[in-house]
Image (cartoon, helix red, strand yellow):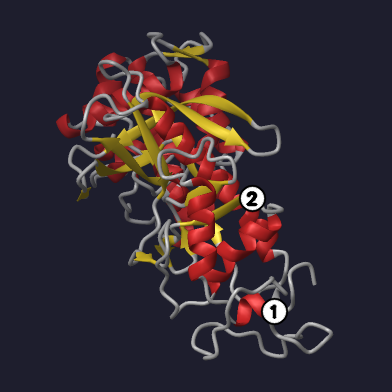
Amino acid sequence: PVGLRREMQAQAQPAPPQAQQAAQQPQSVPQEELNDEQLKEAVRLEKDEVETFRVLFHRAAGPASTLPGKLAVAFFSRSGLPNPALKLIWAACDRGGKGHLTRPEFILAARLIALAQVGYRPTIEQLKLYKSRFPIPKFELPENIYTDDFDMTEAEKAIKHEFDTETGKWKRTLVNVVVDKKPFADGAMRAAYHMRDLSESGENSSYVLKIAKLSGTPVAQYFDDVKMQTEAQKLARAFNGKKVPKRVEFIAAYVMELIDRPNRPICGVERFVPGTYVKYNNNWDWSDDRRNTPQAFSHFSWEESQHTLLVCDIQGVADMYTDPQIHSMDGVGYGQGNLGIKGIMKFLDSHTCNHICRFLKLPAKASKTSDFGTVVKGGRMPDNGNPFPKKGA
């Protein structure tokens, strides 16, 4: 709980140097054994501390009413105190040597641990002499280690469907996710929500979840979109392998099935990338020739796939792309935007090769004479000196 973390992080007044030295060298001397009333008076438990110590005891003992010695050793060792100090504390709190601690005895032990952590000797005598408000003991528990906002109160179960380009098969994983209540972007066909995947941490847990606004959207469309993006990323790796000046990436995407919701809705999910989205070309005959890399990648995809498909409709943040369209020679798959050979030829006929195309020695249909956009310093031209080699050169 947040209240527990805050209290456990509170800074207590440190002991004087002499007391700190004594705390580091605890002496195994018999300590006074308190009866129930004396124990209650010694620990001086405040009303606002009751929940804190209830949670601590539950963390140490679970649902049991007493804390066995073995579990006590495991829990108290997270205090960072040396073993001699912990033995001294155990001897003072395990009244009658029964081998376990009751709840009041656990609170007594926690008080002594807190005193030792701020430099005082962990003894009953010192506990009675301590007149200030007692510090809260600190233990290395998971909630004290992490500083992120990991919150499962709004989590829901989902099935994550990912496409493996190497095997050509889909795989699925059960995950917990948190989806915002309201969309941050609203289009004509889909609404976009911020989503966190609790199986990941930090920035890697931030995603965008896209849900169709109209019922009856074919499930296959979501799977086609993810398959497209995954196959485009495979071609991007080949493109980057040519040592181009600017690398390109396609944002990791998958299909999400929200199984805790009625009718288990299917959605598209991709990593959240902050920045301004820009469209560089479409799936027909338009392209923004102010950028060389996106246009060269589309041309490259046609040659690298051995004239079987072409990746277009390039858009994204800088060269981190999303939502591409693939045209295939046979016009099969890749969603309704796959215009087949007509889409491929329309793009190629309107494409103007740029400096990156020439650096990659891609067969050219036309020439971009300006040097706007990315160029390759010292980039080699084809061996025959012709910047526009014939097909197959």
Figure check: 71 above or below 360: above
Mark 1 or mark 2, whichever is nearer to me: 1
Q: Secondary structure at mark 1?
A: helix
The amino acid at mark 1 is: Phe
For the residue carrying disc 2, how many other residues have a C-alpha within 10 Å: few (<14), some (14-19), or many (20+)? some
Relative to 374, is 126 on the left or the right?
Answer: left
Figure check: 361 above or below 17: below
At horizontal 34% and vertical 37% (from top left) the residue drawn is 127
At horizontal 68% and vertical 52% (from top left) the residue drawn is 305
Q: Which mark is residue 234?
A: 2
Relative to 357, is 141 on the left or the right?
Answer: left
Relative to 139, is 190 on the left or the right?
Answer: left
Q: Secondary structure at mark 2?
A: helix
Q: Which mark is residue 310?
A: none
Rendering coords of residue 269 (x, y %): 40, 40
Can residue 23 be seen here? Answer: no
Mark 1–mark 2 CB contact (< 8 Å): no
Rendering coords of residue 289 (x, y %): 45, 78
The amino acid at mark 2 is: Lys
